[in-house]
Amino acid sequence: METIWFVLVELMLIGYVVLDGFDLGAGALHLVAARTGDQRRMVLQAIGPVWDGNEVWLLAAGGTLFYAFPLLYASSFSGFYLALNIVLWLLVFRAIGIEFRMHLANSVWRAFFDGAFSLASLLLIVFFGAALGNVMRGVPLGPDHYFFVPLWTDFRPGSHPGILDWYTVLCAVATLVAVSVHGALYLILKTEGALNARLRAIVKLLWPALVLFSGVALWASVLVHPQLLDNYRAGPAGWIIPALAAAGLGGIFHFTRTGRERNAFLSSCLYIVAVLSGAAFALYPDLLPSSGDPANSITIRNAAAGGLSLSAGLYWWVAGMLVAIGYFVLVYTMFKGKVRASHA
Amino acid sequence: MNDALFIHRIHFAFTITYHYIFPQLTMGLAPLIVALKTLGLRTQDPVYGNAARFWTKIFGINFVAGVVTGIPMEFQFGTNWSRFSQLTGGVIAQPLAMEGVFSFFLESAFLGMFLFGEKRLGRVGHWWAAFLVFLGSWLSGFFIVAADAWMQHPVAYNRLPDGSFEVTSLWGVLANRWALIQYAHTMSGAVITGAFAMSALGAFYLLNNRHAAYGRVFLRTGVIAGIIATAFQIFPSGDMHGRYMAHHQPVTTAAMEALFQSQTGAPIVILGQPDIERRRIDNPIVVNNALSFLIYGTTRAEVKGLDQFPQQDWPTNIPLLYFAYHVMAGLGTLFAAVMIVSALLLWRGALFSNIVDAVGPDARVPVSIHREYRRMADRRNRAPALARIRPAADPGRVFLQRVRGERPVHAARLHGIVRAAVHLASVFVPARDRTRSRRPARR
């Protein structure tokens, strides 16, 4: 039962990264790629009808995590207190950047909201990347499964790590590159003209960086936390995951060159799904590994809620998520195709 | 006062209070928008469609503010109340997760369609989008209330060996009687907020002679929803909530009413300050026997006072609880009174003319709007550049001419007050007689 919920929570988080990833990436590139007022409006129009729904995946994943693994939620949220509060502010600024912009015709406010949207998106990606790095590296959990990490210490992932050290910063940068590519590919799919051309150039520039950072981050993860390879050693079936990630990378390159926008975006989705599944597969059964004594790690067994609670949830969760996926299919079908500056 | 617990409580209280400003308005506006969309479908009058679109913009921006102030609520369970979350997550996180899965997805997906997809959806499809947004926001309210109700009145749970809680029956948690009563009270409160917002804006438009057609639609819709919601808020939902609380949390009821001594025929305190040291109410205005009657339906019943409970079981801050409760009850009564008067005027066909005529340009009864117009008009005469920008038929100028040409200001004001009073009184005169005695309406 715990394993089922591990997979379900992981699926929701992957859903979040794939979906909100592209509008976060679009935000990070907003100031760089979209130069004119029309182009900026096109970016916002491309994500306008969907970004809010995408962000709900974070809320729903958070709620499901809280419910299935209360200890993990309690420990990680109080341990990452400061970082989470920064994330909250960034979410606030991003949302008002997107939504308030069109209600104020003043150019200074427009510039402020554009900046808020773009900078907050960028920093959110960095923080989420660093969070992933922290989970992969492990945190100094005490015997009561609680911990506290400061924002940074000496930038070394040793026994007293900070939220930011060289490894998590590396993860953050790799995430920023990957999510920016993802966002750019989505915008390419939704736009045309000069904006589209500039985004293509950006993808061409970022792709080698993405390959490089993927490789380095993989190597660094194994270096920092060698046990991550245990599950791969035990079951060779796991090796299909990195193969899929590589296929995704190849797909991005190939389809961008041949101009098949939809396939390029789907390749990027495949890449993100593969990388996150690979990380989850490596962690299992840990949810939050301890950087010290492995006995302090938060695992699916010591963190899961009572069995009755978990089985009660399975019914509504499956039904509810099927319906929710239905809405998303409906929304994306309805808003498919390119946006044009003219109906802004 | 300075311990961490107190700080965390203040922190949570601030977050939830600030957050709730937004969902309260959106949950209240959602059914009103559906009502406007329905009227638009049935009457084919474009005014309703435009009115719905207008309120949807306000809904949309408040929805986003609600989401971003709501995420901190969910986070705070983990960041500030982690032990509590660890123990109760198996129960209270269930409705929270259900809220995400069932209502947030529904709401956000269809809000996107509702805001951006009117052309593609068509009229009926767009009505459905509005309805599903309404459904999503009200479901969301239910799940949150269910989680809160479980914390007030826990049901259907087990304690596990490590001290944590697990659900024995999900249905039991959702059908918690406390949750149902609290939900009814909460949602009618939300509709009151939406109704007041809508009717206030309608009144503002009518007073300013702007967008009069919309002003009338807003005012009518708001007042009709408002009279239903304010009445429902007091009876049955408020009444049931009060009685249920008195049975299950008698110490809370005693503190809210500041009932220090148990007594038969307990009074209800309308006004007065609780003095915790001396255990009495200072400067009280009370209604005898009323509390016993409201809780038990008979004036002779005994209501338990604070003296029946050990002091460590008392709520931490009794004056805060007492005043918050009394302000709430007082405002609820005031809302009902305003809506009753407005609904009566609406029913007699006098609401719009009351606002436009009696409180109109030559009378603006108490009000600062009156002075603003005068100041604006004065400044206009001194600044010809400004006069060119303003349209000629500025109500400020009309008003100024009338005031200067016909009669001194205070006389105009007095005249207005008298006419407002006559109009109010005219509610009680049968409609037909009154229309005959009135001069033709100026439209």
Image: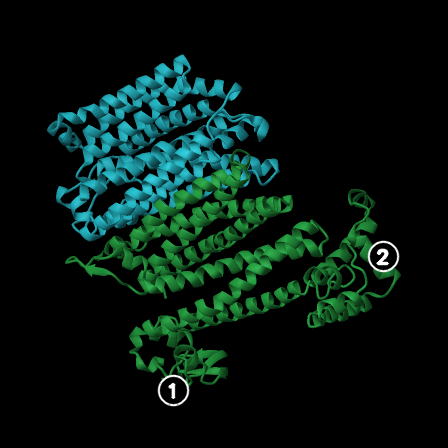
Chain colours: A cyan, B green
Q: Which of marks 1 and 2 is nearer the N terminus?
A: 1
Which amino acid, by three-letter code, is at mark 1?
Answer: Thr
For the residues marked 1 and 2, what is the alpha-carbon distance in whole angstroms? 66 Å
Label drawn at residue B401: 2
Q: Quadrant of residue B266?
A: bottom left
- Label 2 sits on a secondary structure element that is helix
Counting from the top left corner in percent of width and height, residue B284 is at 50, 82
In this view, the residue in front, B173 or B382, is B173
Label drawn at residue B104: none
Which amino acid, by three-letter code, is at mark 2?
Answer: Gln
Counting from the top left corner in percent of width and height, residue B209 is at 73, 53
In this view, the residue in front, A300 or B82, is A300
Packing grade of label 2 (10 A; few <14, some 14-19, many >=20) is: few
Residue under label 1, please give it. Answer: B264
State which quarter of the image contains the N terminus of chain B: bottom left
The residue drawn where x is 83% and y is 61% is B403
Residue A122 in view of the camera: no
